[in-house]
Image (cartoon, coloured by chain):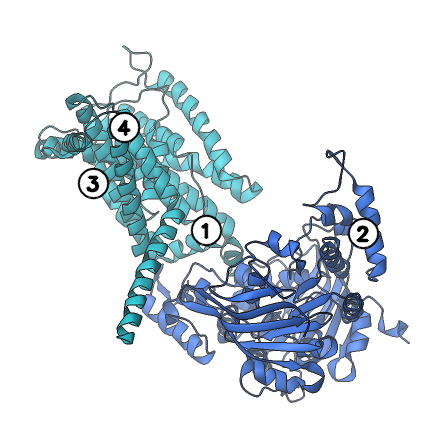
Chain colours: A cyan, B blue
């Protein structure tokens, strides 16, 4: 646990250092670049709000990946689950005429169900036929992409645009005045609050419940779980369903919170970013929360950096990529750390030895 | 003195543990030298150093009197050191020859594989050392014993002079072990030298010339095998006196607990793994299943414990049919299972010891309430098992199962299973890879469990264990019951023949 925090911090540090090298190599002032990058994400209440808003879908997608990881599954289909969940929620939001206090929970439920359905398919295939979930969930991404493409144009098409859904009525989005006011006009919304609740809920399920115990046992060692009488196949399906439901909620936060309609023809990149968020967050729900906010910061700050300096925004993307690289190669960092600790110990032992001689 | 290999004052440290501390091993030319030690004593580390997989922190290695640095296994090969690993490294659907030449393929015009030339050479080697291996047989078609000889051939083909055999007899029948003994004699007659890693004292006595004993990473001594008794070597290895005989009163069998009737099981690979198999185990008795590995034992165990579906036939526990019950239901009915592969089946290595101790009961009070795990009762329960089964670990119940040594992992599993007090305990290889001290202890516990009026089904590849511990012995061959004998009225030879498929009536 403590170890993985150090590894993640090292990954961030190395990523930022590499970014600095890139900026210097392309003839820019790295200190200034970073100043504007962080200012862009943190300068005032509105920017902080935007950072958190950008982070919100990433919290969900990161958590979806992390939850699957913890139970031994690699859910690479978060993008599709997110999109399909958002579509289900949007249909509910546009067609259902009920008070807001009922409508928003219904939309969240619809989103979670949509995501869950999209994830259960790979789950069932894995449980029944041992089809690897990476392959099937990637394919589900594209099925989701085209299903939503068709669905939006058929059921909730925007009359004035070919590539967008009808905007949601204000009552059917997660935006709320008190949050917008608190962050001085930011597009922050209640999606963040839902995300925090879900993070806590998932952390609790994983650590404290018999259900989480079963799912993790299956993830760590399928044969031992089978030996212990745990219903392995059922666990796999549940894991995927929950992971997909979290992704679906992320879709609601993205398309009915940060935005108010669905743009078709795009597979949301937040789905794949979830893998990076989860990696950096060491697959732990709280780690995911923090790493999503950090990614949000980089994404929201890069525009400002680009506006204030002539550093290309791709540098920020490169930093993100390098951080992902380092968190993915955490084994390498751990080895480095171990060597460092050993050197230090040896030096200390050497000193002690010399002390004796004297 | 003419030494082929000398490992002098070898020290190797791993984070937190000194695996080898000042170990010295000298191998004479033309001798069989046994390396004896408990589990975790440092045998594997020492041999890995000789084979170039680890570098020693201190100490020197000399081959033929010259100091060498063995930086990787290729260097070891060049120096004429070859190793036959415990788990064979063979490609199943390749022929013997293809397996042997892999990595050093003979080529024609530098481009085309020349299997014929190699095959001839292998046939020649096989005859010369009396190995009796067909160079063109496929690995999947030949017996385990022959596969082992293929591994030996592989070393000879690469001109190895020093052969390291790591636990070579674990997978063999008594007759095959005898064969192996002859082969080793042939090898040393031709000037080869052998290091035999084992913890079976009987085999050392039978085959080896000298024996180096190590304990907790230190050399205890090198002895002349002919002049040293088994008991003395055991004492050197463990550090105290051990008894080999299992102390037990005659069994007083009661009602039938497990009844298997006409059971047929299909395995994933072979069509029929178990054919029309019937067996009874009564309360208060230990029934041992003897057989060469892969003759249906695992399939029987998996069918009884619910891990594999029965194709046909019935399984009854205390008169109740359980043939199609789930694993969990069978656990509830009172079946305990010490699995063959402790790391694959028996433990979730990434879970703590405490979490592992409730692997089958976590969903019940007091370990969980309304779906929430209760850490306090779980820890107390685990500490109870750890205490009474002497499971040693770094941080007690909180240690990760992975951090425990193999022997302690095994003790933890046995503790967990016996603690649930199952009416039927299925114990598969309960002492696999353990040292004599732990074996003695585990045998005592199994007999105690029997004496409480429970049934024990023991499956072991160690014939001695089956003979010592069982009240009755069922011998399997090729998925069929060859015969059922009384443990007190049989001997190793009879069982050995039955294991090879010779029925009792047919024996002379």
- Tell me which chain the residue with mark 3 is part of: A
Residue A189 in view, yes or no: no
- Tell me which chain the residue with mark 2 is part of: B
| Residue for badge 3 | A193
Mark earlier in primary sequence (4, 3): 4
- Tell me which chain the residue with mark 1 is part of: A
| Residue for badge 2 | B122
Q: Secondary structure at mark 4?
A: helix
Mark earlier in primary sequence (1, 4): 4
Q: Is residue A239 above or below residue B505?
A: above
Q: Nearer the viewer, residue B152 or B255?
A: B152
In space, the residues marked 2 and 1 are separated at their CA atoms by: 46 Å
| Residue for badge 4 | A25
**Residue B201 percent coordinates (x, y):** 66, 78
**Residue B141 percent coordinates (x, y):** 78, 51
Task: Report the disc number at residue A10.
Answer: none
Mark toward the viewer: 4 or 3: 4
Mark toward the viewer: 3 or 1: 1
**Residue A295 percent coordinates (x, y):** 26, 36
Q: Secondary structure at mark 1?
A: helix
Q: Secondary structure at mark 2?
A: helix
In space, the residues marked 1 and 4 are separated at their CA atoms by: 44 Å
Q: Nearer the viewer, residue A173 or B114?
A: B114
């Amino acid at each position: 646990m403590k170890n993985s925090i150090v590894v993640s911090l090292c990954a961030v540090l190395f990523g930022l250092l590499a970014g600095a090298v890139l900026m210097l190599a392309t003839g820019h002032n790295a200190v200034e670049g970073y100043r504007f990058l962080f200012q862009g994400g943190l300068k005032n209440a509105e920017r902080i709000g935007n950072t958190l808003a950008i982070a919100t879908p990433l919290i969900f997608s990161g958590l979806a990946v992390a939850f699957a990881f913890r139970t031994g599954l690699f859910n690479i289909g978060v993008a599709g689950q997110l999109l399909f969940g958002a579509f289900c929620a949007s249909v509910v939001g546009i067609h259902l005429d009920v008070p807001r206090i009922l409508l928003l929970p219904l939309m969240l439920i619809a989103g979670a169900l949509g995501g869950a359905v999209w994830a259960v398919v790979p789950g069932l295939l894995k449980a029944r036929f041992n089809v690897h979930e990476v392959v099937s969930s990637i394919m589900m991404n594209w099925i989701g992409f085209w299903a939503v493409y068709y669905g939006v144009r058929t059921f909730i098409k925007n009359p004035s645009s070919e590539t967008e859904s009808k905007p949601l009525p204000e009552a059917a989005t997660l935006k709320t005045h008190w949050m917008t006011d608190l962050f001085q006009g930011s597009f922050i919304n209640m999606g963040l609050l839902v995300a925090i609740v879900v993070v806590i809920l998932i952390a609790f399920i994983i650590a404290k419940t018999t259900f989480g115990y079963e799912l993790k046992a299956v993830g760590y060692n399928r044969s031992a779980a089978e030996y212990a009488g745990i219903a392995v196949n059922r666990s796999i399906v549940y894991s995927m369903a929950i992971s997909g439901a979290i992704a679906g909620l992320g879709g609601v936060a993205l398309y009915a919170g940060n935005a108010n309609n669905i743009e078709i023809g795009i597979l949301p990149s937040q789905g794949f970013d979830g893998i990076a968020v989860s990696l950096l967050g060491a697959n732990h729900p709280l780690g995911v929360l923090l790493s999503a906010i950090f990614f949000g910061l980089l994404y929201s700050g890069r525009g400002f950096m680009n506006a204030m300096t002539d550093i290309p925004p791709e540098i920020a993307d490169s930093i993100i990529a390098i951080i992902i690289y380092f968190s993915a190669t955490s084994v390498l960092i751990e080895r480095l750390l171990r060597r460092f600790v050993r050197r230090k110990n040896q030096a200390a032992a050497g000193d002690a030895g010399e002390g004796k001689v004297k | 003195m003419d030494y082929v290999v000398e490992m002098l004052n070898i020290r190797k440290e791993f984070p937190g543990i000194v695996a080898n501390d000042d170990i010295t091993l000298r191998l004479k030319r033309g001798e069989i030298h046994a390396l004896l030690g408990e589990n975790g004593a440092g045998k594997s580390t020492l041999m890995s150093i000789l084979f170039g997989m680890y570098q020693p922190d201190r100490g020197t290695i000399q081959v033929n009197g010259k100091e060498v640095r063995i930086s990787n296994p290729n260097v070891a090969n060049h120096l004429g050191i070859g190793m036959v690993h415990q788990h064979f490294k063979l490609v199943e659907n390749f022929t013997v020859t293809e397996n042997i030449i892999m990595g050093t393929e003979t080529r024609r015009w530098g481009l085309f594989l020349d299997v014929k030339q190699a095959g001839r050479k292998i046939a020649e080697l096989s005859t010369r050392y009396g190995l009796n291996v067909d160079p063109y047989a496929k690995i999947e078609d030949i017996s385990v014993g022959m596969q082992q000889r293929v591994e030996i051939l592989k070393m000879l083909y690469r001109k190895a002079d020093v052969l390291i055999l790591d636990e070579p007899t674990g997978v063999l029948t008594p007759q095959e072990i005898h064969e192996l003994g002859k082969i080793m004699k042939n090898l040393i007659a031709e000037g080869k030298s052998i290091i035999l890693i084992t913890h079976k004292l009987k085999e050392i006595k039978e085959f080896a010339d000298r024996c180096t004993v190590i304990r907790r990473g230190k050399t205890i001594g090198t002895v002349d095998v002919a002049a040293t008794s088994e008991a003395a070597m055991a004492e050197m290895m463990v550090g105290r006196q051990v008894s080999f005989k299992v102390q037990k009163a005659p069994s007083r069998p009661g009602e039938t607990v497990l009844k298997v009737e006409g059971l047929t099981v299909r395995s994933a690979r072979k069509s029929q793994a178990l054919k029309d198999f019937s067996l009874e185990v009564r309360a208060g008795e230990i029934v041992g299943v003897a057989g060469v590995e892969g003759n249906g034992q695992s399939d029987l165990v998996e069918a009884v414990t619910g891990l594999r579906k029965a194709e046909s036939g019935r399984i009854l526990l205390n008169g109740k049919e359980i043939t199609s019950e789930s694993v969990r239901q069978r656990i509830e009915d009172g079946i305990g299972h010490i699995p063959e592969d402790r790391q694959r089946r028996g433990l979730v290595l990434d879970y703590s010891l405490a979490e592992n101790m409730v692997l089958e009961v976590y969903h019940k009070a007091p370990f969980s309430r309304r779906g929430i795990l209760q850490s306090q009762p779980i820890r107390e329960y685990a500490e109870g098992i750890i205490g009474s089964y002497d499971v040693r670990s770094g941080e007690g119940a909180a240690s990760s199962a992975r951090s425990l040594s193999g022997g302690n992992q095994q003790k933890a599993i046995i503790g967990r299973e016996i603690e649930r007090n199952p009416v039927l305990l299925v114990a598969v290889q309960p002492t696999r890879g353990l040292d004599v001290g732990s074996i003695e202890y585990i045998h005592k516990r199994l007999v105690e469990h029997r004496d409480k009026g429970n049934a024990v089904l023991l499956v072991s590849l160690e014939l001695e264990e089956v003979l010592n511990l069982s009240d009755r012995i069922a011998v399997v061959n090729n998925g069929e019951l060859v015969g059922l004998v009384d443990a007190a009225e049989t001997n190793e030879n009879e069982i050995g023949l039955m294991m090879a498929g010779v029925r009792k009536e047919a024996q002379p």
